[in-house]
Image (cartoon, rainbow, N blue to C red):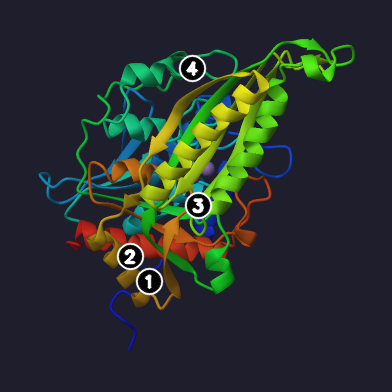
């Protein structure tokens, strides 16, 4: 006897078709996407998403950070909405599914409700958070951070990209600066479907990740100041070598992260040399150290060790060292009642699942500060993400979205 609602499934072909259509906007150079936040490609993706939401009978609201909220009405006008979403912006060499599956999976849930004439007590709001990636404008999850009261709107508007353009100017330029006060909306609950971006689910043959927690993060921006000098004629003993200091700090970060195993990571993805000329020793090196752990004590211990040892490395080389945190959130515990709802949905659908801690940060981490929130994860091939070769299967996408649909309907309350 199938469990009640076991046959309630989304339209897998329609979901996959929407994912592929969105993937055509802001193409990368190797089959993925470069649809960075507040670029013309982002604007094009936003317009396509808005058109799909309109065709699904939803009304669109946009807040002053450019986050998009598409509402499907509920039967109880006084009931707070269930928000379901993720992000459409990508890394410069991003995949086609990171964030996008969560937004278009949420849209597919609404499309399925429309097909079946399902009415819910609580409204449903499909959400596209602006600037989740933080690749162009640090920090990551900037718009959801303003929504949760972690960042001020002025701080966010003043964030600059590597070309010096501000978030506020770029948002106005692409025409997506909404009127709504950021954070004025109140949520009954928040769900986010996301690819795992790690290898665990695929390796264990689990179709669904029941996300109980998300690890915490620090982004520490180091500015090292040495002395520009000729790489050929400057004797080794006379060098004030900021590049060498950076190299020793990167090695030390690796060592500190490995010393805190398991459940600790550390590395550097972005650095800038100035003047960045092959025969000039760098006068300045700027780079961001990204450290993470689900364990608050480990996370803070890594930060302290890295900052202390970096200062000693620089002092030894006569290099000036400045550190500025440019991103941070503590480890997150998602709402147990929503986590249990996701687990029940996976069981009802007969899908193999396992509890998991999210390695990557998500807008759900900030949503959890203002409402009960949780996530649903599906596997990705080889655990690869933030790489244009990121891949999932239509089957994984559909199963993750089926679980999302069941969980959202349980929380929103089916009226008919
Ligand atoms: O950095 C992160 O974890 C996310 O991809 N923004
Ligand atoms: Mn993401
Ligand atoms: Mn990402």
Which is nearer the N-term, disc 2 or disc 4?
Answer: 4
The structure residue drawn at horizontal position 32% and vertical position 20%, both measured from the top left corner, is 153
Q: Please state which of residues 380 and 259 is positioned toward the viewer in this rendering.
A: 259
Q: Secondary structure at mark 4?
A: helix
The structure residue drawn at horizontal position 45% and vertical position 62%, both measured from the top left corner, is 400
Q: Quadrant of residue 333?
A: bottom left
Is residue 411 rendered to the left or right of residue 333?
A: left
Q: Position of residue 165 (x, y in %)?
A: 53, 13
State how far apart marks 3 and 2 are (Cα). Answer: 26 Å
Q: Which mark is residue 264?
A: 3
Q: Secondary structure at mark 2?
A: helix
Residue located beneath label 1 in the image: 346
**Local crowd size for mark 1, using a 10 Å CA cut-off: few (<14), some (14–19), many (≥20):** many
For residue 216, say whether it is visible.
Answer: no
Residue at the extreme bottom: 1
Residue located beneath label 2 in the image: 342
Q: Quadrant of residue 327?
A: top left
Q: Position of residue 248 (x, y in %)?
A: 67, 34
Q: Which mark is residue 170?
A: 4
Which is nearer the N-term, disc 3 or disc 2?
Answer: 3
Instruction: Find out whether the residues at labels 3 and 1 contact each other: C-beta distance under 8 Å.
Output: no
Q: Please state which of residues 278 and 29 is positioned toward the viewer in this rendering.
A: 278
**Local crowd size for mark 2, using a 10 Å CA cut-off: few (<14), some (14–19), many (≥20):** many
State how far apart marks 1 and 4 are (Cα). Answer: 41 Å
Q: How many marks?
A: 4
Residue at the extreme right: 232
Instruction: Find out whether the residues at labels 1 and 4 contact each other: C-beta distance under 8 Å.
Output: no
Q: Secondary structure at mark 3?
A: loop
The structure residue drawn at horizontal position 54% and vertical position 65%, both measured from the top left corner, is 200
Is residue 368 rendered to the left or right of residue 76?
A: right
Instruction: Find out whether the residues at labels 1 and 2 contact each other: C-beta distance under 8 Å.
Output: yes
The quadrant of the rendering that contains the N terminus is: bottom left
């Amino acid at each position: 006897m199938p469990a009640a609602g076991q046959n309630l499934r989304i339209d897998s072909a329609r979901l996959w078709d929407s994912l592929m259509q969105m993937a055509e906007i802001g193409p990368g150079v190797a089959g993925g996407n470069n649809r960075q936040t507040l670029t013309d490609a982002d604007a094009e993706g936003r317009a396509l998403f808005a058109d799909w939401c309109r065709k699904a009978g939803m009304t669109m609201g946009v807040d002053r950070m450019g986050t998009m909220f598409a509402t499907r009405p509920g039967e109880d006008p006084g009931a707070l909405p269930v928000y379901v979403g993720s992000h459409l912006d990508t890394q410069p060499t991003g995949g086609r599914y990171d964030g996008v599956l969560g937004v278009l999976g949420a849209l597919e849930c609404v499309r399925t409700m429309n097909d079946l004439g399902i009415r819910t007590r609580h409204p449903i709001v499909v959400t596209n958070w602006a600037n989740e990636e933080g690749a162009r404008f640090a920090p990551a999850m900037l718009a959801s951070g303003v929504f949760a009261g972690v960042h001020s709107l002025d701080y966010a508007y003043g964030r600059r990209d590597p070309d010096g353009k501000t978030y506020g100017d770029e948002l106005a330029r692409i025409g997506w600066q909404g009127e709504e006060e950021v954070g004025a909306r109140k949520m009954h609950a928040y769900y986010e479907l996301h690819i795992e971006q790690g290898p665990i689910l695929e390796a264990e043959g689990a179709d669904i990740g029941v996300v109980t927690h998300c690890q915490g993060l620090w982004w520490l921006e180091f500015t090292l100041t040495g002395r520009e000098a000729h790489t050929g004629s400057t004797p080794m003993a006379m060098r004030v070598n900021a590049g060498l200091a950076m190299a020793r700090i990167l090695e030390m970060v690796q060592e500190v992260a490995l010393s805190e195993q398991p459940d600790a990571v550390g590395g550097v993805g972005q650095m800038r040399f100035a003047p960045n000329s092959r025969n000039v020793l760098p006068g300045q090196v700027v780079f961001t150290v990204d450290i993470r752990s689900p364990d608050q004590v480990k996370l803070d211990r890594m930060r302290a060790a890295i900052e202390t040892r970096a200062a000693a490395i620089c002092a030894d080389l006569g290099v000036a060292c400045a550190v500025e945190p440019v991103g941070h959130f503590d480890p997150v515990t998602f709402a147990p009642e929503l986590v249990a709802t996701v687990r029940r949905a996976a069981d009802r659908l007969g899908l193999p699942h396992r509890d998991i801690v999210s390695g990557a940060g998500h807008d759900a981490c900030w949503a959890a500060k203002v409402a009960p929130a949780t996530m649903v994860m599906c596997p990705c091939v080889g655990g690869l993400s933030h790489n244009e070769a990121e891949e999932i299967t239509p089957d994984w996408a559909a199963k993750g979205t089926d679980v999302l649909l069941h969980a959202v309907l349980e929380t929103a309350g089916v009226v008919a």
